[in-house]
Amino acid sequence: MIQVEHINKTFKVARRNPGMSEALKTLFHKRYDSVRALDNVSFTIEDGEMVGYIGPNGAGKSSTIKILSGILTPDDGRCLINGRTPWKNRIEHVRDIGVVFGQRSQLWWDVPVIDSFELLRDIYGITEHKFRENLNELVILLNLQEIIKTPARQLSLGQRMRCEIAASLLHSPGILFLDEPTIGLDAVSKIAVRNFILDLNKKHKTTVILTTHDMQDIEALTKRVILIGRGKILMDGNLEDMKKQFGGYKKLILKYSGKGLNLCEGMHMLSNDYSRDEKEQVVNGHAIIELDLDTIQVSEAIARLSSQADLTDISVSGDSIDEVVVKLYKQYEI
């Protein structure tokens, strides 16, 4: 279990005005501004849970992950992970966690990937039997057979990220921190990584905390979302509830023929392209109508429109997860 209570973290950031004279002044007198990265952050994550930790750039996501992994020490507050304080019990703590930073590598650049894996085996003190067992499983699940003997610098980004994930799991951690794990990956690689994480959680009950700007990752992997902005936890809840709250609109895309469409309350015409057959006195059209689900449901809207015209084709679409998150950010003004 992960328990975070009232964590605060402030950084000092050097500032100066542009120009050579200002640069010379900083040699003798540096000016610092304080940046509050985390402000009274609290949450609890149960064993085996997969949680999306989202927020805009500079919100405090990476700072939180670094504190949870023991890299940073907070100014104050309490954090217990499986009964240990990460920054006080680092050696014991790191044996039970895996960390993947999408923009940083734990592989040695000029040696084959398998050499990096074997060095990590020695660092973590993994037995030879357990290492081979885990390695064989990871190689198959992440499709590393063809690249494991290749130096890391010669791998594509997608290949390297799959190797990074494998490196983080060689010691069978119970908790996996993923910070932008699919950044820059193509569609095939993203799907492969997502499927692997889902299988990992299902098979080993691994706790996963995922921070990313790719909302498709969040939607594919997690049911719970924690929103952080300006260093504060702004929302902690179910992803489906969030989608219902901030995605309260649907779009009807219709092809129709008849005398036309008269909209009622809760319907808003976004576009309506039509042609009139004067001989038959019929309108043939293609319309896109937005529905406010607080006012009218999809089934009721279709029934009303069907009574006015012959609907020859109907499709229903809602806000994408990215559009929902944009609305969420706007509500909290972040």
Image (spheres, rainbow, N blue to C red):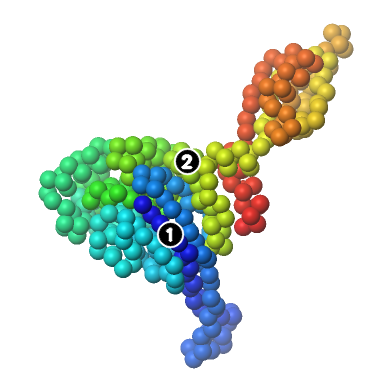
Q: Secondary structure at mark 2?
A: loop
Q: Amino acid at mark 1?
A: Val
Front-most of 155 and 269?
269
Q: Position of residue 203 (x, y in %)?
A: 30, 37
Residue 311, how many percent across, how many down? 72, 16
Instruction: Give the position of the C terminus as an image quadrant.
Output: bottom right
Vertical order, 2 against 85 (above or below): above
Q: Amino acid at mark 2?
A: Lys
| Residue 333: image tag | none
- Left or right: residue 53 versus residue 122 is right
Pointer 2 residue: 223
For the residues marked 1 and 2, what is the alpha-carbon distance in whole angstroms?
20 Å
Give the residue displayed 77% in from the left and 27% down from the top. Answer: 272
According to the image, label 1 marks what residue?
A: 4
Secondary structure of the residue carrying tag 1 is strand
Image side of residue 138 versus residue 48, left or right: left
Q: Position of residue 196 (x, y in %)?
A: 34, 39
Is residue 271 visible to us here?
no
Task: Look at 68% across and 25% down and name the residue there.
Answer: 298
Sequence-wise, the earlier of marks 1 and 2 is: 1
Residue sitting at the far bottom: 28
Q: Nearer the viewer, mark 1 or mark 2?
A: 1
287 vs 245: above or below: above
Q: Are the two marked residues, 1 and 2, in contact with CB atoms closer than 8 angstroms? A: no
Q: Nearer the viewer, residue 82 or 50?
A: 82
